[in-house]
Amino acid sequence: MCSSDLLIGLFLQEINFQRYTFTDMRYRSLSDRFTVAHRAVFEVLTGEIPLYAYGEIGGSRRVKGLGGSDSLRGFDTQRFTDNVRFFSNGEVRYLMHSMWLFGQFLEWYGVGYVDAGRVWSDLAEVGPGGMHVSAGGGMRLSWDRDFVIRCGAGYSSEQLDVFIDLGNAF
């Protein structure tokens, strides 16, 4: 045991929890301009779960909790949290215009979406009822297909949420 491990052991309790995340993402081009995209994420946390673990959902590409511009658009970020979480995003993306400008390739997209999600305290409670649903739309600017700026509005039963963010939601 090195001295840094000893110091950490004196001041911090050992954390023992597991995160099981299942993600499915699919994209289908309907034409040169239309793309349909879908993502579903199901996650289970077990053990002695630290508070910070509730703030993130996902495997290799984590999002900030259930709610906000990366999961349930139309709800506040991290609005819903518990040991078992599920969310689904469906999008229709339409390429409105593309052009070269000063040697850079720019594309403008219009996007419409529907999101749904829910949390439960344990696996025995999981079921399709009680889903929180939001819907909305927005615009995306893609610069050389690597850098994306997106803005949009999401509407839910609780509020209208307007956001500006970087990168595609998925």
Image: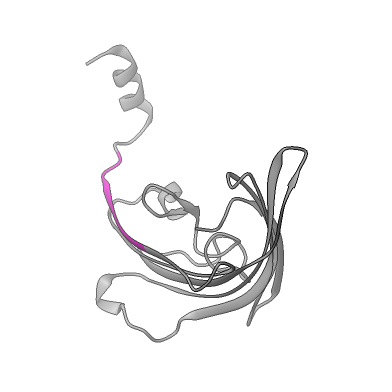
Which image quadrant is residue 101 in?
top right
Along the horizontal axis of the image, is 91 left or right of 47? right
Q: Main secondary structure of the magenta part?
A: strand
Residue 115 coordinates in the image, percent (x, y)? 52, 74
Which image quadrant is residue 13 in?
top left
The residue range painted magenta reads: 15-24
Q: Quadrant of the N terminus?
A: top left
Along the horizontal axis of the image, is 109 left or right of 22? right
Residue 87 coordinates in the image, percent (x, y)? 44, 69
As rendered, which of 8 and 130 lies closer to the eye?
130
As rendered, which of 33 and 77 lies closer to the eye?
33
Residue visible at 58% across and 44% down?
A: 146
Q: Is 17 included in the stretch rendered in magenta? A: yes
Instruction: Pick out the residue farthest to the left.
Output: 1
Report how many numbered discs are placed on residues in the image.
Answer: 0
Residue visible at 61% across and 69% down?
A: 75
**Image height check: is 151 above or below 136?**
above
Along the horizontal axis of the image, is 12 left or right of 161? left
Residue visible at 29% across and 19% down?
A: 6
Residue visible at 45% across and 47% down?
A: 52
Q: Is 168 included in the stretch rendered in magenta? A: no
**Image height check: is 117 above or below 163?**
below
Residue 78 coordinates in the image, percent (x, y)? 54, 60
